[in-house]
Image: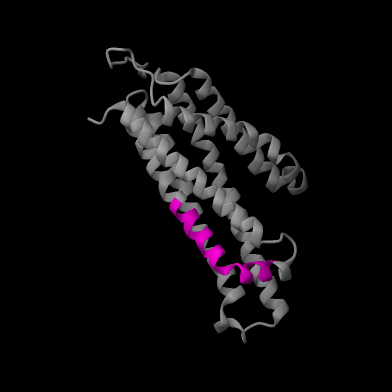
């Protein structure tokens, strides 16, 4: 059986990879895609096509690492409450499936913006608008996947609180982070301008919670008594 400290550090390392790769991919997209400006978006993708491809691959790798993170945490925390641990992995699996399939929209935008095979199929204005359509679909698809990025934090936070491995405040922060993700998603779809305005504020709790959890996993791993054993709370 793998030691809890080993599982915790593996999960922390994978979670850190997720954060780095996902942030990098987001920065690449933000640099290339100009919301509401199709011509500028085509120009941005065209002039940084290689970087855009790297961003796509980075997001795919980050999604894979995210699934592996949830599996490592499942092994670490399943004894606390197996149903909650299974729900955690299920939410991650759904988010990864949506996120991975959604990358086809990003690939389509790249292909249309740069592919010579399509040069004669569309007028320049049509090509620009089609590229913008796929870029917008990629953006919206990512927000849909974010629903499950948030939902996985709820069972994770519960398990963190119940496990005895971590400070309870970390678990509470993770559950609050779930709420932040969900508010961000629904605000962006129901009131896009308002959602964009409040996004940095509602996502702060999630960012603080997840970065704190990553740091704890990497630095402290889990809290164990000096004899090396622990008796975390179990579900009844």
Quadrant of residue 129 in the image? bottom right
Vertical side of 12 occupied by 49: above or below: below
Vertical side of 136 occupied by 94: above or below: above
The scheme the figure's colours follow is one colour
Residue 138 in view of the camera: yes
Q: Where is residue 229 in the image (x, y as percent from the top left)?
A: 28, 16
Vertical side of 141 occupied by 183: above or below: above
Residue 93 falls left or right of residue 125: left
**If the image is split into quadrants, where does the C terminus sit?**
top left
Residue 208 falls left or right of residue 213: right
**If the image is split into quadrants, where does the N terminus sit?**
top left
Q: Which residue is drawn at 61% across and 73% down?
A: 113
Vertical side of 71 occupied by 189: above or below: below
Residue 33 falls left or right of residue 76: right
Q: Residue farthest to the top?
A: 226
Q: Where is residue 19 in the image (x, y as percent from the top left)?
A: 51, 43
Q: Is 198 or 28 nearer to us in this picture?
A: 28
Q: Is 184 or 65 nearer to us in this picture?
A: 65
Q: Position of residue 99 (x, y in %)?
A: 50, 53
Main secondary structure found in the magenta portion: helix
Q: Which residue is drawn at 69% across and 77% down?
A: 126
Q: Residue farthest to the left?
A: 1
Residue 100 in view of the camera: no
Q: Residue farthest to the front?
A: 219
Quadrant of residue 9 in the image? top left
Q: Which residue is drawn at 69% across and 46% down?
A: 188
Q: Where is residue 222 in the image (x, y as percent from the top left)?
A: 38, 23
Q: Give the range drawn in magenta.
A: 41-61
Q: Is 51 or 67 nearer to us in this picture?
A: 51
Magenta includes 168? no
Q: Which residue is drawn at 72% across and 43% down?
A: 195
């Amino acid at each position: 059986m793998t030691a809890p400290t080993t599982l915790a550090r593996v999960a922390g390392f994978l979670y850190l990879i997720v954060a780095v790769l996902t942030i990098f991919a987001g920065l690449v997209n933000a640099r290339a895609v100009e919301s509401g400006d199709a011509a500028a978006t085509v120009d941005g993708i065209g002039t940084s096509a290689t970087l855009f491809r790297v961003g796509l691959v980075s997001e795919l790798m980050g999604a894979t690492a995210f699934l592996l993170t949830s599996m490592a945490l499942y092994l670490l925390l399943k004894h606390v409450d197996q149903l909650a641990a299974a729900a955690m992995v299920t939410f991650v699996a759904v988010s990864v499936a949506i996120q991975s399939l959604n990358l086809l929209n990003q690939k389509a935008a790249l292909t249309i913006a740069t592919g010579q095979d399509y040069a004669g199929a569309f007028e320049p204005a049509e090509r620009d608008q089609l590229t913008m359509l796929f870029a917008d679909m990629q953006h919206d698809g990512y927000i849909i996947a974010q629903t499950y990025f948030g939902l996985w934090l709820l069972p994770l936070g519960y398990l963190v609180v119940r496990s005895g491995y971590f400070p309870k405040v970390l678990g509470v922060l993770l559950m609050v982070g779930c709420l932040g993700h969900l508010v961000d998603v629904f605000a962006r779809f129901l009131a896009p301008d308002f959602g964009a305005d409040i996004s940095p504020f509602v996502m702060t709790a999630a960012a603080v919670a997840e970065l704190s959890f990553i740091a704890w996993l990497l630095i402290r791993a889990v809290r164990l008594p000096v004899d090396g054993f622990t008796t975390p709370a179990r579900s009844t």
